[in-house]
Image: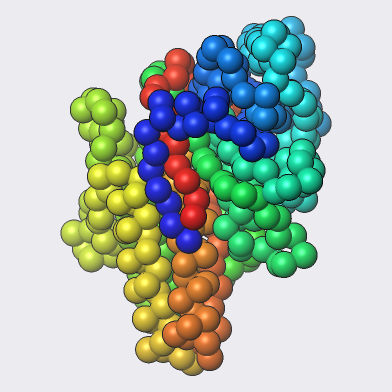
Amino acid sequence: MNLTSLEYTDFVCTLLNTDHPTVVLSSVNFEECSVRLSLDLLRAPGPSKHLHLLPVRLESDKRASPWSALEIVKANHQSLLQAAATECGVSLELRRVKHPANFFAAHALLESARRISEDAPSLVVDISAMPRDLALYLTDILCGLVDRFYTLTFREVFFVVTPPETLTGRAGLGPFSVGTPRCVYQRELLRNPGSSLKTSMLIFPGVEGFESRACIDLLPHTDAHRTVAVNCFDPTLPAALELLIANQSILYDVIEHNAELQYCFSEVDAFRVARETALRAVNLAREFRTMRHAFVIAPFGPKWSVIIASLARAYFKEQCRERARDTVTCSDVLLLPRSQYVSLYSRGSGVPRAFRLS
């Protein structure tokens, strides 16, 4: 599988003029970036009648008061979408999903999108404001990382990521994320890895800083290869410097040869780094056939890093089938347990990024 970057304006024009059923799956949140793509489509002159919007509203068991500020903002975004869709005659079906969402909830959402049309519709997944676990389940299913029983076919698959303009300052508050990193599918994989497990880890560091440190500390120094891929294409210099400053502790590991530092200059370039890291893990599996091998990705960077995680794991799986068939291998993703309201709050919406999965 491959990832192709698309010009956002051209991508929106293509959706507006499509003559084939196209489903836009998104998550309505309190962040402005959560509705940027949908509103761009609905407010454009003459949107295609073949467009179907499938926004998701996450609701936790410990539901916040409907009068809380964030719930009011979320309800306002939902109302904006519904009003705009009614005005231009575009199909909109709001889905309420329990938070945190599991794999089966993600699969049910994709099944709903698939049933929009008898012919396989095109699918646009806007992960801008989705929790990373839900976004991961969706991308894993679409990248073929699941049992054939759960495989769903779409005519074309696109992803959209709208970054926030700024993140709310948190001086003196400490990190909002809670808990330690853990594998999504095999929770015990790295808790007691033992001497028979050789691990290759790729980390996309986040703006909170401690995530990459925690991931590196998860693994013993022996039989582990750690790669930290730093995003160097942020449009603003202060933001890029903040990322490096927040993750400065990893420089010591680089100097001590406990980690390798790589730089990414686009989302597609990040996929190149991920493929190279996956291929190195495959070569280790070929060389040390009597050991177990794990390829683990920690996508704590921008939301597009979740897409890269799924694509890289699919590439690793494919290469292992061809080149390390007799070796015991596995892959997983490290995420942090988070609350819907215990994340960095964003303001505004930046320029959306669109990608085609092929």
Q: Quarter of the image holding residue 38?
A: top right
Residue drawn at point x = 68 percent, y = 24 percent: 49
Residue drawn at point x = 40 percent, y = 68 percent: 278
250 is higher (above) or lower (below) than 341: below
Q: Is residue 109 visible?
A: no
Given the current orientation, which residue lies at the most extreme left position?
255
> Of residues 125 and 239, which is closer to you in this image?
125
Q: Quarter of the image holding residue 77?
A: top right
Q: Which of the colour schemes (rainbow, by chain, secondary structure, one colour) is used?
A: rainbow
> Of residues 312 and 52, which is closer to you in this image?
52
Could you tell whether 279 is left or right of 178 in the image?
left
Q: Is residue 237 visible?
A: yes
Q: Quarter of the image holding residue 131?
A: top right
Residue drawn at point x = 50 percent, y = 51 percent: 357
223 is higher (above) or lower (below) than 186: below
Q: Position of residue 82 (x, y in %)?
A: 72, 14
Could you tell whether 25 is left or right of 258 in the image?
right
Q: Position of residue 5 (x, y in %)?
A: 38, 43
